[in-house]
Amino acid sequence: MQVSYVPSSEPGQWRRTPPFLRPPELPQWAAKVKPFAIERPDQFRPGGPPAMGDKRWAVAFDEVKMLGGTESKTRTEEQTLIAKFWSDFSYTETPPGHWNSIASTIAAGRKLPVAESARLFAILNVALVDAGIACWDAKFHYNFWRPVTAIPRAAEDGNAETEPNAAWLPLLHTPAHPEYPSGHSTFSGAAVVVLGAFFGGDAVEFTVRSDGLPKIERHFTSLRACAEECGASRVGAGIHYRFSCEDGMALGERVAAEVLEKREVK
């Protein structure tokens, strides 16, 4: 069943983004899909992006403008690699799949029994699905604009500290859905909580591979460090603001904590 969605031309509101100008992805999802464990999609809805007249908006705007553009002079080679490593676009395993791969690597390294592995993946994916539903609820509730729209149109945001750049483009193509909160960060927050519960805390050592850069590996000694890098990658890619990554991580954590409480995983 489809839910009608009409983009807005108002400052701060999402509209189709270049270069493909695709219609919004899954605007009906949170409205029509029943979560597995949380009570309703908006149960943990975050407070929303900062007001555009706020200093926090200007700081986040300037960060992604400087760091995430195709012509950035401040983004390092490693930050560029990280952005591409965690891109997880269509025809890849996607962000939830990436965390399933991480869970599989850790479970194999710990020689987790088959029954316990099945339990792990069942609970992990319930948390990831509910986190996705909660994230999409917030995305289409706040309907916030992407950097690729905000930066060329900054003169319309009412903030004297943000300056437009009509030629600005992000390092990576922008996904076709509203900006706030970050999906990557929401899925990551949920995965960190579930995996930490199963593997005895945050201090877990593992190596990650990527469909986007199949010859590259990233090594981590904590789950949270991995999740934070995944979130930061979206700023370096020019796709998200920092506050959307922080709020997305917190949203995913809250959803996963609720899943674990209901599944009695301590």
Image: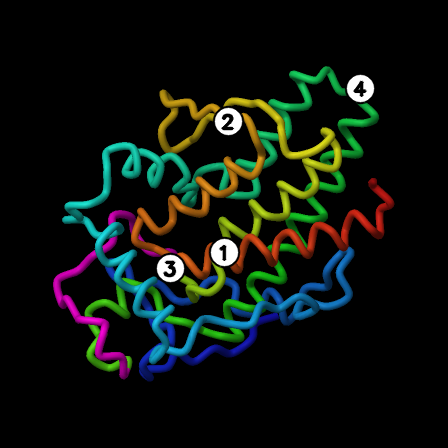
Residue 92, x across and y down, in percent = 45, 37
The disc at residue 113 is 4
Q: Nearer the viewer, mark 4 or mark 3?
A: 3
Q: Is residue 228 above or below residue 151?
A: above
Element under disc 4: loop
Q: Earlier in the sequence, mark 4 or mark 3?
A: 4
Q: Earlier in the sequence, mark 4 or mark 2?
A: 4
From the viewer's side, name the closer residue of 64 and 135: 64
Span highlighted in magenta in the image: 158-175
Q: Is residue 165 magenta?
A: yes
Q: What scheme was used to colour the molecule?
A: rainbow
Residue contact at pointers 4 and 3, CB within 8 angstroms: no
Q: Main secondary structure of the magenta part?
A: loop
Left or right of 184: which side holds 45? right
The disc at residue 220 is 2
Mark 1: give few (<14), some (14-19) or many (20+) Cα within 10 Å. some
Element under disc 1: helix
